[in-house]
């Protein structure tokens, strides 16, 4: 089993992470149990002066409600997330999770309307490569001025070729941002 959690943006510092798409990058715990994930989040959360995006708010005890159960918890299930193109295995896994929530006392509400959900993938498809292109631009100079075959990490201690990080298709699709 694996329990993962994506915290609210700014709750956990991004300091030390290698940037991909800064507004999308977040660190969260992954553990074998919800309790372990909550314990990790207790330690990971909080303001970090080295990360200007981390928020300076008190950190609650994420383990405090673990024994409370799901009675009365409202779980919204947006129809838009079950649109065409969703793989059968993903649909089955989500339906199984919804059934577990309901069996444990959660109030499952289907048909939640997310009117902008259809824009999520196109917006992500614009933001992610744009920010990745900007974040990886620092490495582009090495790529432009050195033969990509002979450029090695040994020759340029921390240099990495953009083509080692991003597939050619993505590089071509972001050229207009440079």
Image: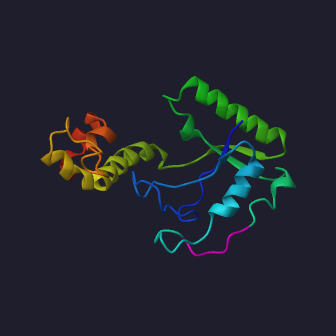
Residue 57 image point, x, y percent? 62, 75
Task: Please name the colour scheme applied to the rendered image.
Answer: rainbow
Residue 55 in sight from this viewpoint = yes
Q: Residue at x 15, y 39 (%)?
A: 147
Q: Is residue 67 above or below residue 85?
A: below
Q: Is residue 118 above or below residue 46?
A: above
Which is nearer the eye, 165 or 80? 165
Magenta portion: prevailing SS class: loop
Residue 32 image point, x, y percent? 72, 42
- Answer with the quarter of the image where residue 24 lies: bottom left
Residue 166 in sight from this viewpoint = no
Residue 134 image point, x, y percent? 28, 55
The number of numbered badges drawn on the structure is: 0
The answer to whether residue 87 is left or right of residue 170 is right
The answer to whether residue 36 is left or right of residue 25 is right
Residue farthest along the top direction in this orientation: 88
Residue 4 image point, x, y percent? 64, 46
Residue farthest along the front direction in this orientation: 154
The answer to whether residue 140 is left or right of residue 9 is left
Q: Residue at x 78, y 47 (%)?
A: 107
Which is nearer the eye, 166 or 103? 166
- Answer with the quarter of the image where residue 12 lies: bottom right
Residue farthest along the left direction in this orientation: 145
Q: Residue at x 58, y 75 (%)?
A: 56
Q: Is residue 11 above or below residue 66?
A: below
Q: Is residue 22 above or below residue 46?
A: above
Magenta segment boundaries in residue numbering? 55-60
**Residue 12 part of the magenta-drawn span:** no
Q: Residue at x 85, y 51 (%)?
A: 69
Q: Where the N terminus falls, by quadrant? A: top right
């Amino acid at each position: 089993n694996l329990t993962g959690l994506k915290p609210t943006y700014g709750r956990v510092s991004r300091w030390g992470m290698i940037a991909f798409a800064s507004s999308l990058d977040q660190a969260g715990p992954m553990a074998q149990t919800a309790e372990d994930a909550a314990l990790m989040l207790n330690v990971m959360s909080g303001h970090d002066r080295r990360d200007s995006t981390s928020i300076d708010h008190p950190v609650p005890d994420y383990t405090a409600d673990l024994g409370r159960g799901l009675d009365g918890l409202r779980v919204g299930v947006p129809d838009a997330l079950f649109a065409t193109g969703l793989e059968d295995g993903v649909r089955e896994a989500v339906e199984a999770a919804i059934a577990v929530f309901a069996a444990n006392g959660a109030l499952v509400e289907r048909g939640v309307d997310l009117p902008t959900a259809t824009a999520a993938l196109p917006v992500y498809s614009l933001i992610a490569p744009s920010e990745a292109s900007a974040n990886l631009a620092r490495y582009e100079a090495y790529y432009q001025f050195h033969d990509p075959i002979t450029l090695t990490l040994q020759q340029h201690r921390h240099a990495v070729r953009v083509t080692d990080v991003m597939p050619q298709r993505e590089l071509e699709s972001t050229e207009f941002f440079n």
